[in-house]
Image (cartoon, rainbow, N blue to C red):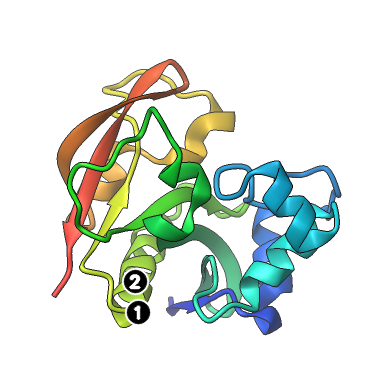
Amino acid sequence: MAWTTHPVTPDRFEDFADVVNPNRRATHCWCLAHRLRQRDIDELGGGSREQAMRRLCERDDPPGVVTYQDGVPVGWCNIGARSDNPRLVHSTKIQPVDDLPVWSIVCVVVRGGHRKQGVTTPLLEGAVAYAASRGAPAVEAYPVDPAGRRMDLTMAFVGTRSMFEKVGFEVVGTTEAVASGMPRLVMRRRLG
């Protein structure tokens, strides 16, 4: 089995869409709900969430990575500099732990039909490698620790503590945010 991970540049946009919005529904979040405010979406995409995401993919630092298993797009990770994420910059619930200019993971998605097949480990490793290649000193994530409890699948995009621990993240703080009724942690992996 061959795993590869690549930033979502315009030429990989359809692969990203195959993972997060295979039916191409216009009202779907397009992984913008936790990255941009509505006025930013309107400005970038003229009211179209898909077009706003396409514009983000044209930037020097695309908004995330797609992981491929044997050439098939199977996973998406929304990652970027925390300072470039207005929703995090202005969040009152997920406060910075310190002044380190971290990159943040805000969404992890595994394509339907590929779940429970080990996709998240190469996906997260690829996301961390992407951040490192852009000079990030550390990567943060804001998952929950279900501790055996069942998670609402609509909130699973935040990830779990064990998923991030598996790839070297450590708990460095807590947040006031919740997902699926569970408090979200601040987990970090230092780079370099």
In the image: residue 1, left or right of residue 73:
left
| On-image quarter of the C terminus | bottom left
On the image, the x and y values in percent for residue 35 come to: 55, 49
Residue at (17, 47) in percent of width and height: 98
Q: Circle 1 sits on which residue? A: 134
Q: Amino acid at mark 1?
A: Arg
Residue at (44, 44) in percent of width and height: 88
Q: Amino acid at mark 2?
A: Ala
Alpha-carbon distance for marks 2 and 1? 5 Å
On the image, the x and y values in percent for residue 60 come to: 53, 81
In the image: residue 126, left or right of residue 20:
left
* Residue 175 tag number: none
Can the viewer see residue 129? yes
- Disc 1 packing (10 Å; few <14; some 14–19; many ≥20): some
The kind of secondary structure element at disc 1 is loop
In the image: residue 2, left or right of residue 56:
left
Residue at (63, 73) in percent of width and height: 57
Can the viewer see residue 118? no
* Residue 131 tag number: 2
In the image: residue 133, left or right of residue 115:
left
User: Which one is nearer the viewer's eye here, 44 or 113?
Assistant: 44
Residue at (43, 35) in percent of width and height: 91
- Disc 2 packing (10 Å; few <14; some 14–19; many ≥20): many
Residues at discs 2 and 1 in contact (Cβ within 8 Å): yes
Q: Is residue 133 above or below residue 119?
A: below
User: Which one is nearer the viewer's eye here, 66 or 80?
Assistant: 80
